[in-house]
Image (cartoon, helix red, strand yellow):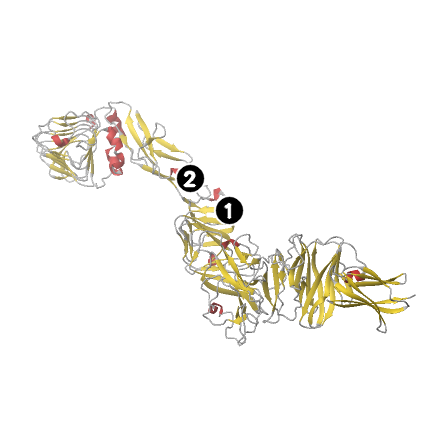
Amino acid sequence: MLAKPTKTFFCNILLSILITGVSISAYSQTKTSDGIGNWQDIAWSPTGVPEAFNDVKIENDSVIIPEGTTVTVNDLEVGKDGNLIVYGNLIVKGNLSMSNNSIGYTMGPSSTVVVYGNFSINNKVELSLSSYLVVYGDFTNNGSSNQGDLNIDDASIYIFGEVSGGGFPEDFGCGSNYSGSTPDVEENCDYGNETDFEENQDEIPDEIVDLINCFDLSSIASQEVCPGQNTTFNVSSYPDVNYQWQEKTPGESTDWSPVGTNGNQLQILNTTFNQSGNKYRVVVTPVATDAACKISISRTVSLTISSLNYWTGITSSDWNTASNWSCNTIPSITSNVIIPNVSTNYPVLSTGATGMVNNVSISNNATLTILSNTLQIGGVILNNGSFDSTTGTIELVGSNSIDIPANTFLNNQIQNLTVNNIAGVTLLGPTSVTGTVFLNNGNLISNGNLTLQSDALQTALIDGSGSGEVIGTVHMQRYLDNSFGYKYFSSPFSNTMVDDFSGYVDLNSSFPHFYSYNENREDAENNDVSGWEPYTTVTNPINTLEGYALNFGGSTNPETIEISGNVNNGSYNRTLQNNNGLYTKGYSLAGNPYPSPIDWDATAGWTRNNIDDAIYFYSASTDDQYTGTYTSYVNGLSSSGSSSASIIPSMQGFFVKVSEGFTSGTLGVTNEVRINNFSQNFYRNQDGEIDKNNKSLIRLKAGYDDYELKDAMVIYFSPYAKLKFEKDKDAFKIMNTNVQVPNIYSLDPFQKKLSVIGIPHPDGSEIERIPLGINVEKEGWLIIELSEIENISGNLLLIDKDKRIVHDLKDNNEFRVYLKKGIYESRFELVFSENFINNEELIFKDPIMVWNENNLVQVKLTLDPHQEGLIRAISVTGQTLEQRQVKGSETLQLEGIKSSGLYFIVLTTAQGKHTKKVLIKL
């Protein structure tokens, strides 16, 4: 490569004289060399180193222009016994000539010689060209071809005049008749005219471009502006010349394209990022064709549309106000943003559009706040101040991998983190997320630094709908507002063991505090027993999609559980059994396998082969850490009334049941069941918002009047429902283990105990009866409460058949009754009808109704259509006066009673015996 010589200053007066063709000899003074050595060091006559207006003669001396030196003269003659060696730069404003008896002329490997006039050489001249030679005039060899060599192997030669003379050797390549036309590039020569000069300009170093121009265009400079701003390229102004500005776009054709107008300025308006990197130059040519300065081409400069945008905060703290930014534009995804330490108004991204940056740098003591909005980042994050996104979303975008350095965010915490970067994002330090991690496109490399935080408000989650994954260890928390007693837990990780809970559960307790559930559990004699099995070995795995019962002790204080591992993602399934055990009945304890809630009602993603549609949740008691209560959910309704009961929180265990009549079933999930829902806390208490779900329904609760917790059941009406149990519409009743809470449920025609039951809409002319079951483990006063009624008109009566009590629940929603320990499944009924009911026998649905009419005993039967029985009329002494076989709902007269008195009418059926007294007066 050529060494870089210094630039030469061209005097405008001299250039003006040159281009008008006026001789400058009247202003010059000839200086002759007087010694051998470097140009600046030898003696000159008259005294003084030659300047740009001097004519110079080198005679009897060998003079060197050293590398790094630029010499400018007017005319230059290498005379008798003179020798000129150029290692630096030589600018000859006039002519350069060599006498017959000159010793020689040599150009070194990094030299540049520009002759604005003619360059003539003579006999016995040794000329070695090894760098740039530009001759604006003629190049003439006046000697013979056998008296000297012209070495041009490494030279770049441009001759704008004539090439003539007989002294050129054959390897000069273009012949003695060269007329200045462009030579063929395949010819053995390396010089050309103005056209070559322009075409090859890109290959000429900038510092040489400025030297070889006869018009001074050195004032041109690259420009850097903000997008949308205007910019101007300038060169010096000269009379009687043409300016042709040219543009080249990166990545497109290598040709230069004309742009702008004929003038010494090129203005570019309303710049855009698409123009960044464009290159510009100007070609200056004289109007007169015979002018001495034929062409000058500026060095190439570039236009940069700055991606750097400084926050000024001049107007306000609003990120989305353009006047707050140095470029007066809101940053885009290509902007490199700097938040400097300003006196007031640090940026807050809240209202308005999503914020966007490429690189972002926050200076010492500066702050950036994301408030309920999103900041997209495509590059480097550098924070030396405060970056607050505790209520905001950070989205990493682009196609180049991004690192999030340690201590990037305030308190190492953000609300939401979105990865939308195919190359992925890496956490280099602890980062807690309180909302959602969304791997929309690209993976998040956690390096053990990601924590999904949980508190009383919500538990952070990983959105399962993206195409990316979290790679590496993740820490997930589960906040318990009351840590008392058993909770049904599962794990969102693939590598969890019992030991991971050892900091929260006493694994060495004499009464086990950690259980798994075995549907086919038997004792040593192969008798059915409860499905709960102690599971306290620390190396036992926590299986995916499986739930476990963990006792967190006797404290009622809140506690945050945290476990770590590799998060589950994708599809999972589990085979469940139904051995119809005396206690297990085909129930299995399942668990949410994901680090996010799942929706039992999701339209896709669930596999429930031979599995009932109901799920069952457990809530610990408030005063006995070993007991609790159950609620159920099916077909959009919760027995307790929770509005979010279909949402199964992360780490939540729940019961499911293999359908009756099947020995096994398959429970499976995919990411499609995952949702971003924070409304369902970890299941602990029974009460919640009522889910009306636009159904006609009745919800009852039962509890002791001296105890806060209650049990609940719901009856709803559907034209598609049947009275008998249906796996997709009804839920069984799992009995509470807390003896302080009674169990209330309904009974279907096959005596199945149900906590949620759907029944057909009643016929307006009929009375609908729902048998109620109550199971109590202690004696005491019980309150049965109508806690909710929706879209039900007419009568709603609670019947105590043993006490012959009719209680109108619409008038008084609480019914109080004293019960001893036991199971009551034939005593209580709900009776409702569209019409008012005032007939007690009809209300209680006595199988026989008896009355005296015209001194005859009338009997009305209310048996089922195919039900049979025997009617007998018996006197007080026990004598049977009459008996008849009966069936269904017939009406009959008894004629065996002939005298006044008290008689008993007895109906005997396969289901039992029913007796009515009747007083006859004849």
Q: Earlier in the sequence, mark 2 or mark 1?
A: 2
Q: Which callout, 2 or 1, points to the residue nearer the camera?
A: 2
Left or right side of 156 for 543: right
Residue marked by disc 1? 318
For the residue pair 599 and 523, the one nearer the viewer reads as 523
- Residue 823 in sight in this render: yes
Left or right side of 753 for 269: left
Quadrant containing the C terminus is bottom right
Q: Which mark is residue 227?
A: 2
The answer to which quarter of the image holds residue 272 is: top left
Point 88% across, 62% down: residue: 856
SS state under label 2: loop
Q: Amino acid at mark 1?
A: Asp
Q: Amino acid at mark 2?
A: Pro
Quadrant containing the N terminus is top left
The answer to which quarter of the image holds residue 735 is: bottom right
